[in-house]
Image (cartoon, rainbow, N blue to C red):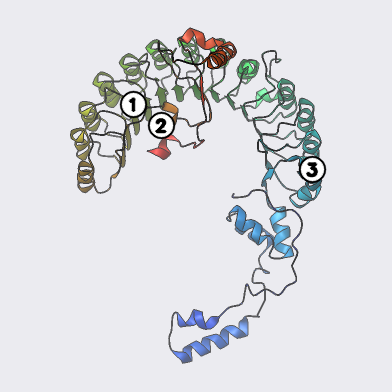
Amino acid sequence: MGQSSSAFGAPTEFNRPSNRFNFRTSAIVSAFEPNEAVEAAAEAELLENVVVGRDCTADLPDECLASIFHFLGSGDRKHCSLVCHRWFRVDGQNRHRLSVNARSDILSFLPSLFTRFDTVTKLALRCDRKSISINDDALMLISIRCRSLTRLKLRGCRELTDQGVAEFAKNCKGLKKLSAGSCMFGARAMNAILDHCTALEELSVKRLRGLNDSADPIGPGAAASSLKSICLKELINGQCFGPLIVGSKKLRALKLIRCLGEWDKVLNMLGNFNTGLIEIHLERVQVSDVGLCAISNCSKMEILHILKIPECSNFGLTSVAERCKLLRKLHIDGWRTNRIGDEGLMAIAKQCPNLQELCLIGMNPTSLALAPIASNCVKLERLAVCGSATIGDAEIACIATKCLALKKLCIKACPISDVGVETLAWGCPNLVKVKVKKCRRVSSEIVDSLRERRRSLVVILDACDIEPLDGSGSEIGVHESGMEFPPIGNQVANASSSGNSRFAMLRTKFGFFADWNFVACTFRRWSNNDDSFSGDL
């Protein structure tokens, strides 16, 4: 609703006469009627009904004024709250979402802040890396003042401990959504949240430093009966959430992103005891075909993301296709390992007729797979192929001929030419948007010709030089900040002695990657764009 952190304290000048509602009626009338007599008559009539300096919003109920405030951005709303005492009061009483710079020196301002904003239900506490964050005392005060909180976001609050979070959970039992990132508390705090916040529906945990190898199991707790979504990102010991994942019987969405350790065991228990999931997102985690076969027991699954997981192959994808026939969205980043190809995609084409969205990154499918997908998946509306050496003009012609329901098409870093793009001029009758990126053999002339032939079609061409493809950094897929472990194959880069020692330390910490024939770990920070597939096409 465009609301964020607000200025502390009360306005300083409320009684100064305001000209905000003064009107120059002559300017209004002259815009419609240049006749001076008519203008004078209209001005005289308006002056009889308008009192100079009168607040024209005085007759509006507080509820209407609050509704107007909800349409304003953060800056405009803060400025409006300084207009008069009434606007200041109405803004405070109807602001339900608040974002606070959670530095330690805010403690003395918290009582006055939450006296003004006494109806806050959604709170974000953020602290930058260079500052000292709020501590347990501040969080306790917030929990007492905001007992009706339903959503809490913690970012960089490194001074919070297990004890402080546990006390917070006792006071805010109505919490429905919790997102914690870059904090220092651990398993004890998470278990307290799960035990006391019985209405919790969404849990997102990212870079929780208090979870070490000796962390206690987390969950299931009382919240397991209501939890619907779990997202774990960049955790060293994320497997301690296993009891929570398996015990949450209403769980519908599970996302595991760049979490260290082996996950097949957790997914195997999930497939045996909790088969109601609809969405599963796996990115850069150690999962093999054993894990894919386990989640294939979730027969109601509609959305599946398999991104940069080199241990997954056609066998695991075929198992998913045979049992998850309701699949609607499928994203695969093969990371150029060629372990998932035509065989797995043909199984998808045969078993998943409801497929509507397909994104293939770093794979090499051919017409052997694309043809059955186009023929059998008659509901396919969104298709993206990125970094494929086998997608050429013949494959694009196949798509143009057989994908009758296709609405959005994205082609990136594929060896297509003007000939392939030209086939879209008479194919795909429902196509509304085409994006071609980093395809050097496609010229602007053919794009202009395509626009001329299909005027309602949006065509976007980006013919810049091809860069090394990264699935997570592509236009389609998941954009998150964090760790990247690119495969180097059998090539070993020369390094100094100090570099070798650092590699030895990293290989010790992330030793499970040794079985994958990885010889280096590179850390890269990606921008968090959160562009969805449909938003990009």
Q: Earlier in the sequence, mark 3 or mark 1?
A: 3
Residue depicted at 45% across the width and 22% down the height: 307
- Residue 507 position in % (x across, y down): 55, 12
- Of residues 57 and 209, the one nearer the viewer is 209
Identify the residue under disc 2.
Answer: 474
- Of residues 136 and 228, the one nearer the viewer is 136
- Residue 413 position in % (x across, y down): 31, 30
Q: Please name the amino acid that badge 3 sits on.
A: Leu
Q: Which quarter of the figure has residue 302?
A: top left
Residue extending farthest bottom: 37
- Residue 12 position in % (x across, y down): 75, 64
What element does badge 3 sit on? helix
Q: Which quarter of the figure has residue 440?
A: top left
**Tags 3 and 1 touching, CB below 8 Å:** no
Q: Please name the amino acid that badge 2 sits on.
A: Ser
C-alpha distance separating marks 1 and 2: 9 Å
The numbered disc on residue 387 is: 1
Asked if residue 380 shows in the view, the reply is: no
Residue extending farthest top: 515
Q: Earlier in the sequence, mark 1 or mark 2?
A: 1
**Tags 1 and 2 touching, CB below 8 Å:** yes
What element does badge 1 sit on? loop
Residue depicted at 31% across the width and 29% down the height: 378
Q: Earlier in the sequence, mark 2 or mark 3?
A: 3
Residue depicted at 74% across the width and 25% down the height: 189
The numbered disc on residue 107 is: 3
